[in-house]
Image (cartoon, helix red, strand yellow):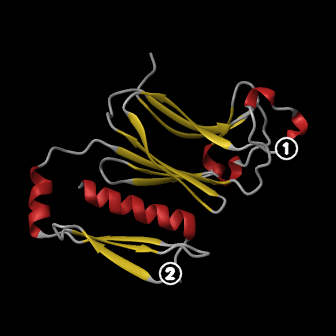
Amino acid sequence: MYKKMLATMAMIFAVTLLGCGNTSTETKTETPAKQEEATVAEPTAEPVVEAAVEDTEETAETSEEEAPDNRTFIVISWDEASVEYTGDPYEYQVDDGIVAPQIYIEGDSVRTTSVSDEGTIHTEIIEVGDPDTYVSIIVEPTAPTNDCPLDTVTATITHPDGKEETLTPETNLVRGQTGIWYFDVYEQGSDQ
């Protein structure tokens, strides 16, 4: 099941960042057990990452015997093409320009498994381990301003049952108590 989730996350990552299509030469790598086959495109102007998993009878039987996987995977990305200010958020002045977004995480049992930049697209993959603990994940400006490209943020959440949901600025931008907008990504449990 874990391999299927990783393959699904790789496909989501590729589609989210790059869309469909392949314009490069491909190389294949195989794992020693020959249970998984991955195809990774070499970097070009429009890189594409593809992954395919072959499910053999042996892996299918093993999956049924394993305990259920309670992890949730979240892929968050945004475009930093218009970002002008990347300095100290405490020294930010109104005329300093557009600031970069940042991911803010509260809670335990959460880890960032991947951070990448492809051109101006910044992507992070986050794993939430324990479904019974409090977790809150938001994307917010790095400085106290609404001059931040939050309108380019997207998130894809893959729940433990395999259900996926896609979040967009149209549905998940929220104005905070201070008047600053943020992108509400994920929350579980209670902080009480």
Q: Which mark is residue 88?
A: none
Q: Residue 89 at what x, y percent from top left?
A: 74, 31
> What quarter of the picture does the N terminus occupy?
bottom left
Task: Give the image quarter of residue 147.
Answer: top right
Question: In the image, is 98 to the left or to the right of 159?
Answer: right
The total number of labels drawn is: 2
Which amino acid type is shown beneath numbered disc 2? Asn
Q: Classify residue 121 by image quadrant.
A: bottom right
* Residue beneath the point at 57% across and 76% down: 44
99 relative to 77 in the view: left or right: right
Dividing the picture into quadrants, the one containing residue 190 is top left
Q: Is residue 91 above or below residue 82?
A: above
134 vs 148, left or right, is left
Which residue is depicted at the point 74% across and 42% down? 86
The spot of residue 63 in percent (x, y) is 15, 55
| Residue 38 in picture, x, y percent from top left | 32, 71
Q: Which residue is under mark 2? A: 22
For residue 97, the mark is 1
Q: Residues within 10 Å of mark 2 (few under 14, many from 20)?
A: some
33 or 186, which lies in front?
33
Picture residue at 63% right of the left edge, 51% below the top: 153
Image quarter of the C terminus: top left
Residue furthest right as drawn: 95
State the image coordinates of residue 107 (x, y, percent, origin top left). Answer: 44, 27
Binning the other alpha carbons within 10 Å of mark 1 as few (below 14), some (14 to 19) or many (20 upward) gives some
Q: Secondary structure at mark 1?
A: loop
Q: Is residue 117 above or below residue 101?
A: below
- Give the mark nearer the N terminus: 1 vs 2: 2
